[in-house]
Image: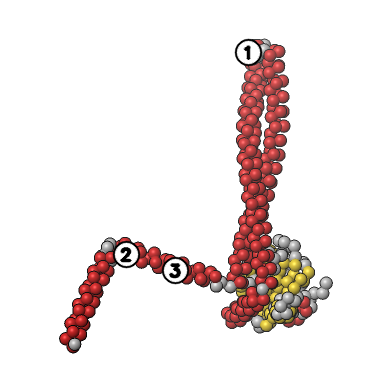
Amino acid sequence: MTYTLMRRSLFYFVFSLAACCLLLATFLTAYAGDPKEEYNKLQKEIDVHKEKIEKTKRLEHSTLDEIDRTNKDISQVQADLKKYRERLRRLENEMRKVEVEIAANKAKLEKQAGWLKRKLRIMQRYGYSGDIILLLSTSNDMSQLMRRWRYIKEITLHDRNMLESYKETINKLAGQEDRLKSLRAELKTNEEDTKVTAAAISEKKKNKEILLSSIRKEKSSYEKIVKELKESSNRLLEIIRRSEETETYAAKGFHNLKGRLPWPVNGRVVIPYGTQKDPRFNTPMFRNGIQIKAEDDSDAKAVHSGKVVFAEWFKGYGKLIIINHGDGYHTLYANLAEIFYSVGDIIKGQQIVGKIGESGMVNAPGLYFEIRYKGKPLDPIQWLKRR
């Protein structure tokens, strides 16, 4: 019995060893190919896994990031539209200038043509070939002869200059008409670009409104974006605190201006300062500033003199500029389409710091405005002049 078991165990051992050898041989055969080919296969597998990881990351991006990307797209397309419109104005002005020049040259050409016609009629009536000889031969003395010769020479030179001027006017007119034709073609192309860009802005704004609408309908999305906006506000607080440590501005007196500061833009407050509850979800949200609705492309002005400590895109605020007014006071101007100053620039009161845009959370032109004292938000309405 024991002998039989031993024989059976030995058989299983030999069989297993043979199977392992066979598997090893198969493995070696499979991977005995070109190392470069195997590397490429491995790299492809890595790329596939990377794509899966990136896809997961994209699915996990924040709501505020999505709005931020949409705002950046709108801002870029609006910048393109402004560039096209400026080019249109330039082309139209140049076309008007060329049209005036063409009209002037046509009038000059008509005048020169009239002179040439009269000249030809006189030449045909009186003949031309013998006139000079006859005129010179009837001179009474040498002084009269010289005078007549000088007159003839001056008349001939005048005629030559008139012909050259006529020719030059024709060439200039032809060049101006070609230029006008080219400008009209460029104008047409630019008008098409402007229409396409304006349509793209409209589409992107529509997508943003759909996104904001979906956020307002879903409580989880709304609460998430409230949390993210609070985090952005805290990051702003850190920026302000760092600026107080590193940036110095010696001006004083801001604290005496409560209730007397000029408005940063002409408009009306559509979102007030403080805590408001969402009527749908009854979720409280604290706003550190006010949203002032204004005309698109309006000027945003500094409420007081100071030093720029931040001037770039900021998540949740769009294009943002922060001004240090000294003694711990800062003002913030957000949702801008353009910023006209850089960090370190000194700003005077009522100086234009940028153009109003739609780069923030509200899908309408307006300025988001904050006043902070040592990082703590203050109610801007209490500081601005009553209207």
Mark 1 sits on what residue? Answer: 129
Q: Earlier in the sequence, mark 1 or mark 3?
A: 3
SS category of the residue bearing label 2: helix
Where does label 2 land, which residue? Answer: 38
Q: Give the spatial CA distance, label 1 vs label 3.
A: 95 Å
Q: Which three-letter amino acid code belongs to the residue tagged 2?
A: Glu
Residue 66: x percent and y percent? 60, 68
The 10 Å Cα crowd at callout 1, few under 14, some 14 to 19, many 20 or more, is: few
Q: Name the amino acid, label 3.
A: Lys
Residue highlighted by disc 3: 50
The secondary element bearing badge 3 is classed as helix
Q: Secondary structure at mark 1?
A: loop
Q: Which of the two discs, 2 and 3, labels the residue nearer the N terminus?
A: 2
Percent from the top left, x then y, of residue 333? 68, 71
Pick the front one: 132 or 61: 61
Q: Do we see residue 120 in this rendering? A: yes
Quarter-of-image position of residue 377 = bottom right
